Image (tube, rainbow, N blue to C red):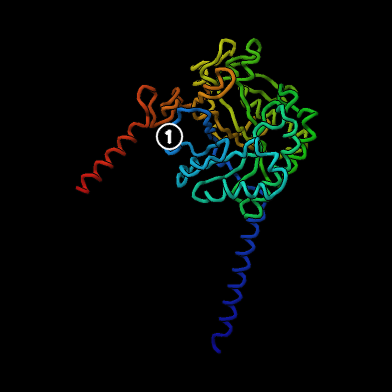
Amino acid sequence: MECTFLDRLSTRIMGFYSFFLWLLIFSVISSNVFTVYAFKGTYGVNYGKIADNLPSPRSVVTLLKAAKIKNTRIYDADHEVLKAFKGSGIEIIVGLGNEYLKEIAVGEDRAMNWIKENVQPFLPGTKIVGIAVGNEILGGDDHELWEVLLPSVKNVYDALRRLGLTKVVEVSSPHSEAVFTNSFPPSACIFRDDISIYMKPLLQFFSQIGSPFYINAYPFLAYKSDPEHIDINYALFKSNPGILDEKTNLRYDNMFEAQVDAAYAALEKAGFPKMEVIVSETGWASRGDDDEAGANLENARTYNYNLRKRLAKKKGTPFRPKFVARAYIFALFNENLKPGPTSERNFGLFKPDGSIAYDIGFTGLRESSGVSSFIPFKVITACITLVLLISAS
């Protein structure tokens, strides 16, 4: 009886503490109801595999770790890659290919089956943090895909929601600059009229679920198309007079930031000023055909070296200084089976044997292609085998 008052006081304190803790948890959850960040860093790389001479996925994991690259994108959901990435800590966005969209758009059950086969079984060991639904659909040649993109995105998201994965896996869809009418100066950028009727509902849905706008931005392609009027130094982050956007009075000393801000300007005009822009692809070709201006090893090294330095600063752009610039570099490897001009097969930071294509500061990798950078790991494997044989004898 003597402890009744203290017991009641203790009970009330515990009850208040429990309520406060519940309220805190609820507020944290509520503030992130629709938001999942698939790209927590600023520098990632696209791991394309249109080649017949690439190292194994396990060797790729070793390479990425040596280069300290923690974010990557693939263009499919290759199970061998997803198995190899298990336990690596490397965050990966998988691709739901364009060829699946018409089927996925039919119903949520199709999306559910795809996720249960290609995503859910690999979680949480493999850090799948996003699904890119299609690639460069709007602005492409297949108008039937324009119509099924949004239904596909919605079905994928709804399937993830039913599986309780929307806080883990982001849904997105990367676009090319073909979705814009123009992008110079940045403040003049708008979405094409024929695309807006598909783009605005897609952006509305992405805004609701907290997904960013992914854009493939290539100063290389812009320079290649008009080398007479574009300053190569402006495209390569080198010293240059820059350009002044007279409408915003903002000065740009590199094309990369101008392209990103062009996307921000188009989003603002479409009614989505708070949506973040992430560059899903950017890079520079180290080789090209005679008519591909600027495609050479030195320019590729300069662009990718300066871009890496720029992203490491973790700062925004002139038009959106509070949004940290983030980009996935295209690409990890030169891909010898890609169709198109020579440049398409020569965007890699690394050669197929794992050696660097050119030096932009990665550590733990060899510059020479004469000796594979993966030989040491083969030697280690051989040594382990020898030790096991000696132990067993």
Query: Residue farthest to the left?
Result: 393
- Density class for disc 1 (Cα within 10 Å; few <14, some 14-19, many ≥20) is many
Q: How many marks?
A: 1
Please give left or right for residue 273 compared with residue 90 in the image.
right
Q: Is residue 37 above or below residue 266?
A: below
The residue lying toward the viewer, choosing from 104 and 364, is 104
Q: Position of residue 100 (x, y in %)?
A: 65, 39
Residue at 68% x, 26% y is 177
Helix, strand or loop status at disc 1: helix
Work out whether residue 309 can be spotted: no
Quick one: quadrant of the N terminus? Answer: bottom right
Please give left or right for residue 152 compared with residue 304 in the image.
right
Q: Is residue 48 above or below residue 205?
A: above
Q: Position of residue 58 (x, y in %)?
A: 43, 39
Q: Amino acid at mark 1?
A: Leu
Q: Is residue 356 above or below residue 132?
A: above
Query: Residue farthest to the bottom?
Result: 1
Q: Position of residue 278 (x, y in %)?
A: 62, 35
Q: Position of residue 174 (x, y in %)?
A: 65, 34
Work out whether residue 25 can be spotted: yes
Residue at 32% x, 33% y is 376
Residue at 54% x, 41% y is 92
Q: Quadrant of residue 364?
A: top left
Residue pointed to by mark 1: 63
Please give left or right for residue 328 compared with residue 389 in the image.
right
The residue lying toward the viewer, choosing from 96 and 230, is 96
